Image (cartoon, grey):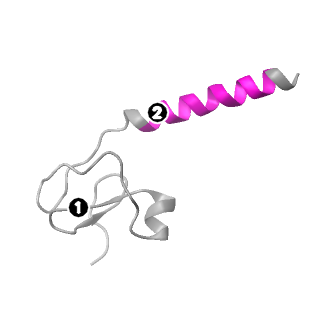
Amino acid sequence: MLTSILLGMATAGVVVVLLGAAKPVPDCPECGQRVARIRWPDSGAQAMKGGWTCKACGCRMDRHGRRVGG
C-alpha cells in the first residue's frame, strides 16, 4: 500500500516538472530579449506567482510575459 502511494506521488511529481519545463519562455515586452528559462525570483510575489525580471532592461513581467508594476 505504501509503495503504491509513493509511486503515485513520484509519478505526479514527474508530470508537474515536465509540464513546467514545457511552458514557453516569454520575450521581454520592453526590449524583446528572451528571458532565461531558469530564474531567481526578485520578490516573494514573484516566487509565489511566477514571473521574470529582464536582465537587459529591468522590466518586470508576470508568468505570461505581460509587464507588471511601474
Asked if the stretch drawn in magenta spans residue 13, the answer is yes
| Amino acid carrying mark 1 in the image | Cys
Identify the residue at horizontal 37%, vertical 54% (top origin).
Answer: 63
Q: Residue furthest bottom?
A: 70
- Judged from the image, the secondary structure of the residue bearing numbered disc 2 is helix
2 sits to left or right of 20: right
Q: Earlier in the sequence, mark 2 or mark 1?
A: 2
Tell me the mark number nearer the camera, choosing from 2 and 1: 1
The dot on residue 19 is: 2
Identify the residue at horizontal 19%, vertical 48% (top origin).
Answer: 34
Q: Nearer the viewer, residue 26 or 17?
A: 17
The answer to whether 21 is drawn above or below residue 68 in the figure is above
Q: Position of residue 65 (x, y in %)?
A: 28, 54
The dot on residue 37 is: none
Quarter of the N terminus within the rendering: top right
- Judged from the image, the secondary structure of the residue bearing numbered disc 1 is loop
Q: What is the distance, in whole Å, between disc 2 and disc 1 at their CAs?
A: 23 Å
The answer to whether 48 is drawn above or below residue 16 in the figure is below
Quarter of the view holding residue 54 = bottom left
Extent of the magenta region: 4-20
Q: Position of residue 32 (x, y in %)?
A: 12, 54
Q: Nearer the viewer, residue 64 or 55?
A: 55
For disc 2, the neighbor class at 10 Å (few under 14, some 14 to 19, many from 20) is: few
Q: Position of residue 29 (x, y in %)?
A: 18, 58
53 sits to left or right of 33: right
Residue bearing mark 1 = 54
| Amino acid carrying mark 2 in the image | Leu
Quarter of the view holding residue 39 = bottom left
Quarter of the C terminus within the rendering: bottom left
